[in-house]
Amino acid sequence: MSSAMATDLTSKQRRILQYLRENAATKTYFKSRLIGKELGMTAKEVGSNITALQNGDYDIEIEKWGYSSSTTWKVNV
């Protein structure tokens, strides 16, 4: 990830990206509501911000996987 691209992220997007990087080594699937609970955000905030990460050129692959009581994301580092 280039530093120019990192500065284009909002603080929420940077926090989500850091959270996913730290936890993706031991976990593959993440629910928006659980990420939000950990980071003090709503599931809707996580979902809208994770899309920017999904479409960006980062060292992490994020795929919308399913929806059951909250959107589930499949994450590969």
Image (tube, grey):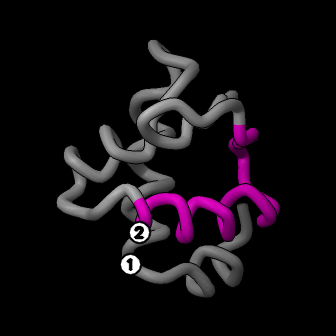
Residue 28 position within the rendered picture, expressed as x and y whole percent measured from the top left: 57, 19
Pointer 2 local density, CA inside 10 Å: few below 14, some 14–19, many at least 20: some
| Label 2 vs label 1, nearer the camera | 2
* Circle 1 crowding by C-alpha within 10 Å: few under 14, some 14–19, many from 20: few
- Which residue range is magenta in the image? 44-64
Name the amino acid type tagged 2: Glu
Residue occupying image coordinates x 38% and y 78%: 11
Mark yes or no: residue 77 visible: no
Residue 57 inside the magenta-drawn segment: yes
Left or right for 54, reference 12? right
* Secondary element at tag 2: helix
Residue at 78 percent of width and 65 percent of height: 56
Compared with residue 51, is residue 20 higher up or lower down, i.e. above or below? above
* Depth order, front residue of 67/26: 67
Quadrant location of residue 51?
A: bottom right
Determine whether 23 is above or below 28 in the image. Answer: below
* Cα–Cα span, label 2 and label 1: 12 Å
Residue at point 71% right, 41% down? 64
Disc 1 designates what residue? 11
Label 1 near label 2: C-beta < 8 Å?
no
Horizontal side, residue 21 vs residue 52: left or right: left
Looking at the figure, which quarter contains the C terminus? top right
Image height of 67 relative to 47, above or below: above
Dot 2 corresponds to which residue?
45
Residue 76 sits above or below residue 19 on the image: above
Q: Which type of secondary structure does the marked residue at label 1 adopt?
A: helix
- Classify the position of the N terminus by image quarter: bottom right
> Is 55 included in the stretch rendered in magenta?
yes
